[in-house]
């Protein structure tokens, strides 16, 4: 189907499958080509640099922290630049048998370090602006990612990263289609602002259902009804899955970005479960199709550690050991400064970042089980909107 994207529509979903993609590569590489295939796809997806002073040592023998980034990039439009619309930290303990996912709200108020290469002097802004200030003036993705990573390091009190990844939305779409969709549980009624049905012609996805004012959906267009995802578990077609996890404006509980973060994390688990299912990894043609999609979707900054070593190290992580965590317990924590609305991390979220740094996450989560986001978690009540 064809879907149009509004001018203000963020391409946040570029991020979500990085971790699953790495494990997918492990499954595929073992089945259909060994080192030759691995080297081929390694050349497609791995990149040097991108972490600046936020880089950890070039080893993944101990605990691992990955910065996963989805960006809204206007290719060929330097004036528009690029912003990171999704930021997730993935922590793998030294035992290399689990992974913890924590989303950092893009509106979080942070101190952004200077970027001499792009002539940005440093300052206080929203977290998603860090990538843009590094990207501008010819900095590109590498410098944008480095400045974002350094900003998160400053926010967290010193957390360093063993690797990072950026996912391209169009390539990501191909990866979802290669899997044939996923099975997910909808935890709150979600109304799509991007996909609708024309009640006269019956066409789906040809026209966005809502009118927009200043980037916000307002009234329904004539003869249009939006796609609605009702509560319950079901198989999602590829286009439905991608549309569902894009939404944040018309979530039944009004939990906006936090609801979207939760759905993104659930989607990662669903994709990984599908990618590692017997019907997928035993089909060489499907594995090849997925690997080709990964090469188009993922830009992986490996911090001078070979992709083969990454795969060998992460092979013990499976969907049942992927734990998604609710930042700020899924509730808005707004902060208004000089008339501008920001999000701020509560003390528990800051303590979780310290636990990432100290590799004490298992103990921390055991003492804060309210932070665990189940696959169909009940959203927090009465959050306020922290701004777009």
Image (cartoon, rainbow, N blue to C red):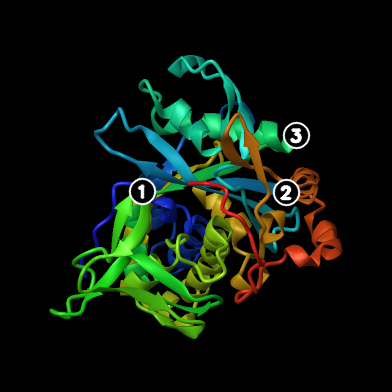
Relative placement, left or right, of 290 versus 314 is left
Which of the 4 quarters of the picture holds residue 314? Answer: bottom right
State the residue in front, 88 or 386: 386
> Which numbered disc, 2 or 3, marks the residue closer to the eye?
3
> Height in image: 68 above or below 49?
below
Which of the 4 quarters of the picture holds residue 227? Answer: bottom left
Q: Which residue is mark 3?
A: 157
Q: Which residue is mark 1?
A: 215
Q: Earlier in the sequence, mark 2 or mark 3?
A: 2
The quarter of the rendered structure image containing the N terminus is bottom left
Which of the 4 quarters of the picture holds residue 3? Answer: bottom left
Residue at figure coordinates x 44%, y 18% from the top left:
118
Q: Residues within 10 Å of mark 1 (few under 14, many from 20)?
A: few
How far from the left and from the top, in percent, is residue 298?
41, 50
Q: Secondary structure at mark 3?
A: loop
> Which numbered disc, 3 or 1, marks the residue closer to the eye?
1
Relative placement, left or right, of 302 versus 108 is left
How far from the left and from the top, in percent, is residue 277?
49, 79
Query: How many numbered tags mark residues here?
Result: 3
Residue at figure coordinates x 30%, y 28% from the top left:
79
Q: Is residue 2 visible?
A: yes
Q: Secondary structure at mark 2?
A: loop
Relative placement, left or right, of 54 versus 29 is right
Q: Earlier in the sequence, mark 3 or mark 1?
A: 3
> Height in image: 275 above or below 57?
below
How far from the left and from the top, in percent, is residue 152?
63, 36
Q: Secondary structure at mark 1?
A: loop
Q: CA distance from mark 1 to mark 2?
A: 41 Å
Q: Residues within 10 Å of mark 3 (few under 14, many from 20)?
A: few
Relative placement, left or right, of 89 versus 220 is right
Q: Which residue is mark 2?
A: 63
Residue 355 image label: none
């Amino acid at each position: 189907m064809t879907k149009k994207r509004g001018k203000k529509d963020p391409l946040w979903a570029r991020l979500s499958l990085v971790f699953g993609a790495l494990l997918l590569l492990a499954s595929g590489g073992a089945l259909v080509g060994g080192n030759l295939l691995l080297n081929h796809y390694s050349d497609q997806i791995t990149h040097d640099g991108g972490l600046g002073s936020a880089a950890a040592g070039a080893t993944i023998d101990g605990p691992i922290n990955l910065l996963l980034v989805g960006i809204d990039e206007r290719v060929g439009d330097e004036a528009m630049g690029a912003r990171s619309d999704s930021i997730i930290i993935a922590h793998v303990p030294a035992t290399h048998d689990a992974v913890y996912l924590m989303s950092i709200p893009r509106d979080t108020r942070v101190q952004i370090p200077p970027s001499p290469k792009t002539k940005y002097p440093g300052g206080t802004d929203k977290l998603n602006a860090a990538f843009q200030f590094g990207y501008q003036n010819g900095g590109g993705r590498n410098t944008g990612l480095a400045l974002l990573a350094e900003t998160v390091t400053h926010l967290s009190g010193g957390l360093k990263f063993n690797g990072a990844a950026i996912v391209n939305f169009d390539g990501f779409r191909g990866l979802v289609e290669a899997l044939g969709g996923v099975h997910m549980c909808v935890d709150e009624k979600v109304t799509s602002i991007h996909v609708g049905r024309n009640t006269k012609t019956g066409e789906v996805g040809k026209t966005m259902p809502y009118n927009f004012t200043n980037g916000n959906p307002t009234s329904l267009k004539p003869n249009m009804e939006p796609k609605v995802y009702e509560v319950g578990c079901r198989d999602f077609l590829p286009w439905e899955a991608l549309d569902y996890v894009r939404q944040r404006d018309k979530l039944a509980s009004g939990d906006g970005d936090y609801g979207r973060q939760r759905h993104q994390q659930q989607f990662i688990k669903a994709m990984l479960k599908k990618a590692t299912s017997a019907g997928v990894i035993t089909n060489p043609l499907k594995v090849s199709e997925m690997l080709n999609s990964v090469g188009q979707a993922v830009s992986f900054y490996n911090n001078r550690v070979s992709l083969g070593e990454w795969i060998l190290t992460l092979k013990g992580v499976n969907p049942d050991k992927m734990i998604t965590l609710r930042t700020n317990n899924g509730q808005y924590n707004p902060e208004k400064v000089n008339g501008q609305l920001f999000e701020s991390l509560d003390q528990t979220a800051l303590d979780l970042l310290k636990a990432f740094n100290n590799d004490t996450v298992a103990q921390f989560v055991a003492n804060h089980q309210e932070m665990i986001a189940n696959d169909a978690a009940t959203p927090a009540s009465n959050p306020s909107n922290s701004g777009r």
